[in-house]
Structure formats: C-alpha cells, structure tokens
Image: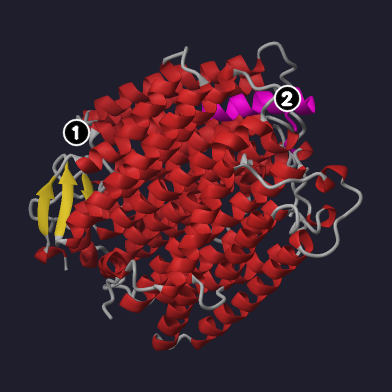
Amino acid sequence: MNLEALHTGLIETLSLTLVITSVAAVEMRRLKFSIVAYLCQALLIVGLILSFAAVNRALYWWAATALVTKVILTPWFLFRSIRGVDDHEVKPVIGFGPSAVIAALLMMSFYHLTHGRGALLAPTEMAQLGVFRTNLAVASTVFALGLYAVLTRRDAIKAVIGLCLLENGVHLSLVSLAPGMPETALFGVATEVVVTVFLLLYVVDGVRREFGSTDTFRLRELRW
Amino acid sequence: MAGDMLIETSIVPAVVFLLPMLAGTIVFSIPGVGRAFQQWLSVLTAAVVTGLGAWMASRILQGLVLTTWNGELRVDALSALMVIIIGGIGLLASLYSVRYLAARMAEDTTLRRMRIFHGLLMWFFGTMLWGCVTNNVIMLYVAIEATTLTSGLLVAFYWDRRALEAGYKYLMLLTIGITFALFGCVLLYAGAAATNKLAGGSALLISDIRNVVPFIPSGTAAITIAFLVIGFGTKAGIAPFHPWLPDAHAEAPTPISVLLSGVMINMALYAMARTVSIFYPAWPQVTVFIVALGTFSMLLGIILALAQDDLKRLLAYSSVSQMGYVLVGIGLGTYLGCYGGLYHLLNHALSKSLLFMCVGAVIYATGVRRIAELGGLRKQMPITSVCFLLGALAIAGFPPLNGFWSKLTVYLALARAGMWWAAVIAILTSILTMVVMLRAVYRVFWGEPRSSGTSALAAREVPALMWVPMVVLAAMCGLLGIWPQGPYPLLDRAAKVLATLGR
C-alpha cells in the first residue's frame, strides 16, 4: 500500500517536472539551453515510461525505443544544426510573461478536463485510474505547449524543438491510451519523428545558407 | 457486406509496395549506376506495379479479397482501385520525368542529386502503395507520414529560396497535421479494444474494428472522427487545412507535382474515407459535417484559384477545390455518393496529372509559368495546347468528358440525400472552374504572343517522351467520357466498400 502511494507520488512528480522542462525548452533564449531542456525532458519521459512499465510490462520496449530516438538521436541532430553558428534565438512573437501565463492556464484546464471527463478521451478501463489521468493531462499540456511554440516562435530551430515537444506529448499519451500496442507499431511511430526532425533540420540548414538566417518571417516569397 | 467475400491469402499485396522500396534501395545503395538505369528502373517498377494492380483487380472482380501476413495487408476493390491509379499515374509521371529533369537540371546536376531524386521517388511511390494496402490502423498513419518524409526533399529538390520555403512548410505543417491523425488512429484502436466485443479479431485491423464501432461511446467517437478528419484532411489538402498545398505543388519539380496533386492527396482522402466511413452506420449525422467541409473546400479553392497568375499555383488551388467534390461524394456515405466520389477521384487523377504535365511542357519550352508573360503558344505547341484544353474541359465538367459524368453523379447523390444547398454550391463551383480554366487556356495558348519573353518566341513542341504521357492521359479523359461504364465493375465494388449507409 505504502509502496503504491510512493509509486503514484513518483509518477506525479515526474509529470510536473516534465511540464517545467517543456516551458524551459520553449522559453530559453539560447538554443543550446533549449536543447538541453529538451534532453532533460526526454530522459524524464524514459523514466516515466519505465515507472509505468511496472504496471504494464509491454512498455519496456517503448522505453528502449524512446531512449534511442528521443534521448540520443534527436538532441544529437539538434546540436549538430547549431554548431558553429550564433545560437541566440530570433526574438519570438510573444515574450516570456504571457507565455508563462498561457502555460499555467493550459496545464490547469487539461488537468481539470482529464480528471473531470477522462472517459471522453480515454475509453480504456486502465485510463480511468488516477495516475493515467494525470499522465493524460501532462501529455496534453506538453502537446499544446509544443503547438504553441511552433505557432509563435520565429526561429525555425525553435519551431523544430516545438515539434519535438508536440510529438513527445503524443507519445506520452500512448502510455495510457494504447497500452497493448505491438512493438512494430510503436517502433514505426517513434522512428518517423526522428526522420522528420532530421529532414526538417536538413532543410533548415539549406534555409540558413540561402536566406542568411533561420528567421521564418523571411520565408515569405510564396503568398496566396 | 464483408461476410460474403472469400478471403484469399496472397503475397501480391506485399510485393506491390515492397518492390518500389527495393528499387529505391537499389538506386541508393549502388553508387555506380548511371542516370539512364535509374530512370528506366523507375519506369519499369511503376509498370510492374500497375500490372500487379490490374491482376489484383481481376481477382477481386471474381469476388475475392486478398490478404497477407494474417490480415495485416488487405486488398479489396477500393485498395485495388488506388493501386491502379498510383501505378498508372506513377508510370506516366516517371516516363515524363526522363526528359523533363534532364533539361531542367542540365548544367549543375550531379549524378548524386539524380540518385536522390530517383531513390526518393521510388520510396515515395512505395509508401503510398503501402498506405493503400495496409489494414492496420496504426500502420496507416505510419505509411501516410512516411509519404510526407519521402516526398519532403523532392518538394525542395531545386534547393532555391522558393523551393526551400515550400519544403520547410510542407514538412512542418504536414507533420503537425498528421499528428492529429495519429491521435485519431490511436483513439480508434483504444476505443475498439475497450469494447471487448472483438471476438478474436484485432483492435488494430480496420476490417475487424468495423464490426465493433457501434459500441464505442459517442463522445469518444466524436473526438476520434474530428481528429481523423483534421489529420487526413490536412494531408488531402482540404480547406481550411490546405496552406501547404499550393506552395508544395507549385515549387516541386513537375513530375512530383503530378504525383502530389494527382495521387498523394487522393491517397490521403482514401485513408480518411476508410477510417471515417466505418462510423456512419452508428452516427449518420457526421455526413452533414463532412459534406459542409467538402463544399467549403470546393468553393474556397476555386475562389483562390481565380486570383492566381502562376499556372502551377492555379492548378494547385483547383486541386483543393476538386478534392472538395471527392470529399462531398464519399462523405455522403450513400452508394451513389461514394460511386460519384470515387469516380471523380479517378477522373481528377487523370485530368489534373494531364494539366500539370502540360504546364510542365510550357515551362520546358519557354522557362516561364506566369500567365501574364505567356500567350499564343497554340502555333508553336499544338499537342500541348490541345491536351491542356481537353484537361481543362474535363476538370470543369464539360460534357461529354469524364469529369462531367462524375460531377453529375455527385450532384444527383446530393439531391437524393436532400442536400440541395450543397448541390447548388457544387454546380456554382463547376461554373467558376470553367471560367478559371478557360481563361488560362485562352491567355496561354490562344491570344497574342507576348513580345517580352524572348524565349517564348523560340518555343517548340516538347519531345515525344513528354507528349506521349500527355496524349495518353488526354485520351483516357476522352475515353472515360464517351464510355463512362468502363470502370463500372471495379468502381461498383469499391463504392460498396465505402457505402456504409446503403443505397
């Protein structure tokens, strides 16, 4: 009984830290620190999946895949893309103050939604448990923060980090929504994100050479 | 419906998508192969795929369903139709690309870049086919995201400012959009698994999920449908999720534009139809929502096309509009609607590929694609101008060409379903399409030659390897117009798969 409470406490602490790392990844002005924040988040996700794996053994595979794709490959690609260039982010559309408020509001509303009406989003029986509801709330918050970063950040690399956060949110939700998913499907889903990040950074590198910066506001030759 | 079909285990559904994957891998992994080998390997692969598609169709017409790997892959009439469309258009596009790319990239193209082009083209081809033959709902998402990844660098292939911008937007927007589809697919899986009524079936296989969908709670069903429509709708270029489409379709090399506009968006719509149509019997009210989305797409697409001066962007916006027709037809869920929608899907693939190839021919001959800088090309390029005229009339739904029959079917289906407002918008859009297309035909091919573009005066008809695919497509448009019952056996069975609401 006591162990179970500890387990729940661990999961909730990890979840909260996850949200903090997301905000950090979105808000850090130096891209290098932003990537470090993302790396921390990836490590936390692996830890979180491992702690869920105590309940559902199938998740060990998921944790291993996440370790390779999220902790090793993605940050490596990201670091490679900022090597040798000024890594100060192009000033975003919305600054730190409003962002923090938006993040807090998102978290509260998702927590409220999943705990009040969890059955809507998560039809499985397991997802009705408290820990999984918290997991869903955190997953939705990370997803929304990623989307927010993609929409409001001018720097292309920051947008790619936002995309990674968004995907992390989705993958986190799979823990609750699709516990019995076979490894091949999980492997396919996880691999594609890494390939997406690689290709996007490859194109962003081309953009930097051609336009002289990674400011997406300069990408405006094609209108209408 | 599914019960009375005989299931046959066959390896062909796997071969049909693994073959292009293998061809792409060969192109990438053998460094010494020459350009000609790559080109003809693409053509040969596409030809074999088309043949296999036709073979599968002939088996299916005998009342069979082909499956592989314990039902992981499943080819029914709808899948076979898609395989034939992808194979056929892919064959013509790769034939077309032989001369087109050689001319466009003559000076600075290294063999390495050509290898990237052909390798990715084959993989793009393979992933699209995979999406059409898979029966696994998660792999459907994986395959569709894979088509984005394999085509991303093809869109940005010219690597100049415009191509890079288009490539960045393409990868970013489509990845985000398709993530919603992942949510939708996962919810569909979780919802089906939670019903506990699968009776030995798998919650991953669409053909098994079909049977338990009525037991999914309606709240979950609503969210699932919304996610699936947003996700696959983004990929299909349905307005308001279309902003990536004109950029990508216009900036990609023309053979890729042909595949994006003629095939890829169709295939995304196929994925949407596959997954959403299974909800109709339990929630028929969804159809109104889908039809409204389709009419919005057709109207917005053609209005934006009216304002275009760039020929390729004009065609791209027209695709947004035409996808609306297909969505309206399929979204109705009735037999007549699905028949009309699928028929229009086929016709749009033919006529839009034709139009993009003609514009590619104009670019090839003159180096220009702005309507204002073109004019009077009819004398120098007679074949291209006749083909473009035929394609334009077909897409505008001018009788007796193929587009007329499919649009007429969609109108009739709308009227029978009592959605007169949608039928009126559809007819209005058709008139606007006629205006947009004929204006382009008149300005580019008839009218006075523009003196400003010196290259335009020296324009000559394109080489045979380019005009032959165009003539084939134009002939198909005409043939299906005077012989609309030709594809009936296959379309009939395919429509029955989707027509979950009955007649």
The amino acid at mark 2 is Arg
Alpha carbon distance from label 1 to label 2: 56 Å
* Residue underneath mark 2: A208
Is residue B398 left or right of B273 when viewed as pictured? right
Which numbered disc, 1 or 2, marks the residue that appears first in the sequence?
1
The amino acid at mark 1 is Met
| Residue neighbourhood size for the residue with mark 1, other residues' Cα within 10 Å, grouped as few (<14), some (14–19), many (≥20) | few
| Residue neighbourhood size for the residue with mark 2, other residues' Cα within 10 Å, grouped as few (<14), some (14–19), many (≥20) | some
Where is the N terminus of chain A found, in terms of image quarters? top left
Q: Nearer the viewer, residue B2 or B97?
A: B97
**Which residue sits furthest right?**
B452
Residue at point 33%, 52% (across, down)? B187
Query: Does residue A171 lie above or below A113 as drawn?
Result: above
Q: Nearer the viewer, residue A139 or B472?
A: B472
SS for dot 1: loop
Please give the range of residues in magenta: A197-216
Residue A27 visible at all? no
Chain letter of disc 2 in the image: A
Q: Nearer the viewer, residue A33 or B189?
A: B189
Q: Position of residue B194 (x, y in %)?
A: 20, 54
Tag on residue A1?
1
Residue at point 39%, 53% (across, down)? B85
Task: Classify residue A181 by image quadrant.
Answer: top left
SS for dot 2: helix
Magenta segment includes A211: yes
Count of picture labels: 2
Residue at point 21%, 41% (across, down)? B12
